[in-house]
Amino acid sequence: MSTSIKQSMIDSFMQIRINNRESEYLHPSYLLEKQLLTSVSEGDADKALTILKSMNKEYRPQLAEKPIRSLKNSLISSCTLFTRAVIKGGVQPEQAFHLQDACVLEIERVQDYETLEQMEYEILRHFVHLLHEQQQTPYSKIVNQAIAYIHEHILKDLTLDMIAENSYVSPSYLSHLFKKEVGVSIVQFINQKRIDESKHFLLHTNNSISEIATLFCFCNQSYFTSLFKKYVGITPKEFREQHA
């Protein structure tokens, strides 16, 4: 970060503190925000809406010079928080991020301040509805939580113990339940997901195959190539060449 940018951020930080102190503005309680996100992740729309309305009785923070831009920035921040909350609740990250993108585009389209204020409640309902839809999948809540955790941490060295701990069950129980419901073991599911995600890096980056193998926690390039061919039918090099 350049010195000028760093100084500008410091100046902005100090000015915001002064403005908030003069207007007696305080950010909503962190505890209240946690309660809101917990309600969203549990699919309790009524409770979440009640908390959000309570939080919005206070003045919103100033996030831009123009009021409507400031409000839009605030709503986009809420979208980000709701996205993380429903992923925690079991929604697959891709679906949550698609909804987030759609909401942000709609926020940018609307130019009426009062409409935007009401929009935040509709956005919250959309996220909770997505969570309820996800819970109607053929998988149980435990398996959905495990899948969501795998998606969110796909670039980490995942273990059965870690995933089971996040789902609040024993590793042996999760392993049995996952294989029963999904039809493959957790290890196979993780490998398949990593192979799918690696395709993006093969097509859209200049990273070497060895670097991509390391990024997705495969022990070496040879093992990555072997698994890739098993699931895709061709090697990573052939895949990259065919789609160049």
Image: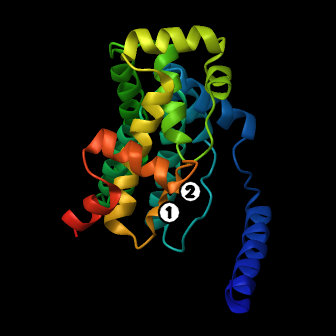
The colour scheme applied to this rendered structure is rainbow
In the depicted structure, whether residue 194 falls above or below residue 137:
below
Q: Position of residue 159 (x, y in %)?
A: 63, 31
Secondary structure, mark 1, is helix
Name the residue furthest left. Answer: 242
- Quadrant the N terminus occupies: bottom right
Labels 1 & 2 near each other (Cβ < 8 A):
yes
- Quadrant the C terminus occupies: bottom left
Could one spot residue 86 in this view of the protein? no
Name the residue furthest bottom. Answer: 4
Residue position for label 2: 214
Crowd band around label 1 with a 10 angstrom C-alpha radius: few (<14), some (14–19), many (20+): some
Q: Position of residue 192 (x, y in %)?
A: 39, 37
Q: Name the foreground residue: 92 vs 34.
A: 92
Residue position for label 1: 210
Tell me which residue sits at (40%, 46%) in the image.
Answer: 226
Q: Name the foreground residue: 33 vs 203.
A: 203
Tell me which residue sits at (44%, 14%) in the image.
Answer: 179
In the depicted structure, whether residue 140 falls above or below residue 104:
above
Tell me which residue sits at (56%, 13%) in the image.
Answer: 174
